[in-house]
Image (spheres, helix red, strand yellow):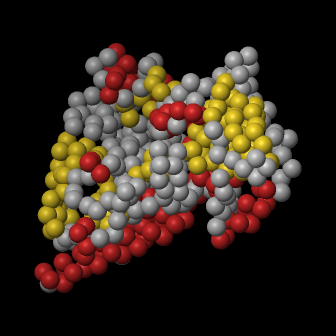
């Protein structure tokens, strides 16, 4: 049974991505008791799925390792993974949270040796790699996963594979009798940090993501570029596995569009500029854009990419994509809005810079909260002691999400400080 010791001076953080981790660590390091609830089997969120950050093109693993070390060293922080907050009742300073914890089927004895994964035969689409590869029915989500503990896929429970995993484990870490748990605990304030999800490219019908193999999304391209990703860092075409000879990036794929996302997702321009540096310098790259939003400190990076001889910019909202059936190449149709010339450009691979939308829909929130028309949480007195952090509040890059999360932690601390002062 999971035990949580919490009071109305405890801060609940919902979501363990970069924003949730930041808020939880900042609060815990001031001496506050913090419970962090994360839906995935590990913390770190979508940042763990990035190959590089912009504009410095450094690797997220460094900052991730530091945050994980801070979390392991802090006795004030209790992390519950594979868990969801299903209800929050009460008011600022006196909430009761209900949390559902899914069974991992692997206990804390696990040393992440991998013997169970070797013993299991069943394979499933790897959600960490956006379904571009396979993982075993007993698996570690990624090499730096925290907690560093394997998971059994629920689909193998009751099968021979589950018993094979149990028999292979030398430290008695496999517990096939684990059950779903529901727990309740007190909290004085809540930081909501459930992050974002990529906009569903299937909804952008003219771009053919659902029917053209060589049209992929920016998040898929990011995993493809990672040496630890599904292709070992090789930029290959899904249709035939050949290394790409030309790449097109389509900006605002689902953003700034009355039929899809109304808002500018802010990170897409910079993400595509970053990804334009991934292929070799002799691979032709074309970026189709409405306008490039590389504000303040990003302008220098934009100019650097723009100066690359293999990178070309076409100011245009691509109208449609059709497939050349002979070679599988996507062909982009549209009008260059600077020269008003029609084009039908063929590329090896097309990358859709999909927008960001909140991970949690308004109807799914377990507490009354003020939401704007884009689905993000608005700062409002009606929210009481519930504070949005990072991409729950708006489309933000990593740097701004971390700054915003620090502010949310400070507001939550103020609430529990008032509780302590009143009761003291």
- Front position in the image: 204 or 294: 204
Residue at 47% from the left image edge and 44% from the top image edge:
259
Query: Is residue 393 at least partly visible in the picture?
Result: yes
Residue at 85% from the left image edge and 41% from the top image edge:
282
Figure quadrant of the C terminus: bottom left
Total number of numbered labels?
0
Image position, residue 84 (x, y; %): 28, 47
Q: Is residue 193 left or right of residue 237?
A: left
Residue at 14% from the left image edge and 83% from the top image edge:
422
- Front position in the image: 372 or 221: 372
Q: Is residue 171 left or right of residue 303?
A: left
Image position, residue 139 (x, y; %): 45, 32
Query: Is residue 2 at least partly visible in the picture?
Result: no
**Above or below for 58 versus 230:** below
**Above or below for 131 versus 42:** above
Q: Is residue 380 left or right of residue 353?
A: left
Image position, residue 181 (x, y; %): 20, 41
Figure quadrant of the N terminus: top left
**Above or below for 302 versus 416:** above
- Front position in the image: 293 or 401: 293
Q: Is residue 120 left or right of residue 279?
A: left
Residue at 69% from the left image edge and 18% from the top image edge:
325
Image position, residue 383 (x, y; %): 25, 67
């Amino acid at each position: 049974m999971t035990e949580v010791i919490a009071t109305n001076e405890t801060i609940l953080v919902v979501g363990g991505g970069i924003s949730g981790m930041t808020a939880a660590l900042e609060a815990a390091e001031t001496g506050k008791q913090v419970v962090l609830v994360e839906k995935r089997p590990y913390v770190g969120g979508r940042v763990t799925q990035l190959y590089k950050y912009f504009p410095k093109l450094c690797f997220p693993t460094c900052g991730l390792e530091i945050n994980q070390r801070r979390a392991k060293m802090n006795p004030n922080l209790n992390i519950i993974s594979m868990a969801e907050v299903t209800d929050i009742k009460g008011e600022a300073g006196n909430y009761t949270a209900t949390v559902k914890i899914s069974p991992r089927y692997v206990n804390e004895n696990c040393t992440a040796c991998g013997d169970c994964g070797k013993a299991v035969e069943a394979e499933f689409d790897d959600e960490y790699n956006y379904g571009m590869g396979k993982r075993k029915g007993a698996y570690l989500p990624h090499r730096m996963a925290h907690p560093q503990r394997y998971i059994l896929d629920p689909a193998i429970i009751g099968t021979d594979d589950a018993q094979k995993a149990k028999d292979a484990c030398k430290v008695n870490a496999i517990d096939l009798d684990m059950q779903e748990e529901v727990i309740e605990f007190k909290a004085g304030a809540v930081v909501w940090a459930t992050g974002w999800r990529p906009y569903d490219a299937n909804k952008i019908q003219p771009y053919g993501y659902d029917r053209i193999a060589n049209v992929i999304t920016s998040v898929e391209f990011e995993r493809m570029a990672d040496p630890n990703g599904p292709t070992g860092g090789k930029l290959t075409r899904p249709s035939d596995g050949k290394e790409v000879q030309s790449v097109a990036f389509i900006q605002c794929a689902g953003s700034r569009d009355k039929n899809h996302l109304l808002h500018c997702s802010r990170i897409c321009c910079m993400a595509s500029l970053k990804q334009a540096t991934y292929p070799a310098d002799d691979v032709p790259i074309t970026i189709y854009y409405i306008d490039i939003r590389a504000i303040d400190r990003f302008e220098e990076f934009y100019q650097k990419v723009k100066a690359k001889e293999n990178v070309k910019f076409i100011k245009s909202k691509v109208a449609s994509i059709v497939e050349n059936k002979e070679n599988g190449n996507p062909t982009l149709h549209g009008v260059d809005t600077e020269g008003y010339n029609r084009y039908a450009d063929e590329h090896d691979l097309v990358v859709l810079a999909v927008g960001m939308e909140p991970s949690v829909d308004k109807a799914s929130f377990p507490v009354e909260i003020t939401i704007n028309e884009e689905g993000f949480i608005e700062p409002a007195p009606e929210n009481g002691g519930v504070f949005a952090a990072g991409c729950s509040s708006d489309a933000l890059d990593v740097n701004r999400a971390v700054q915003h999360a620090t502010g949310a932690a400070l507001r939550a601390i103020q609430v529990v400080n008032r509780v302590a002062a009143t009761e003291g």
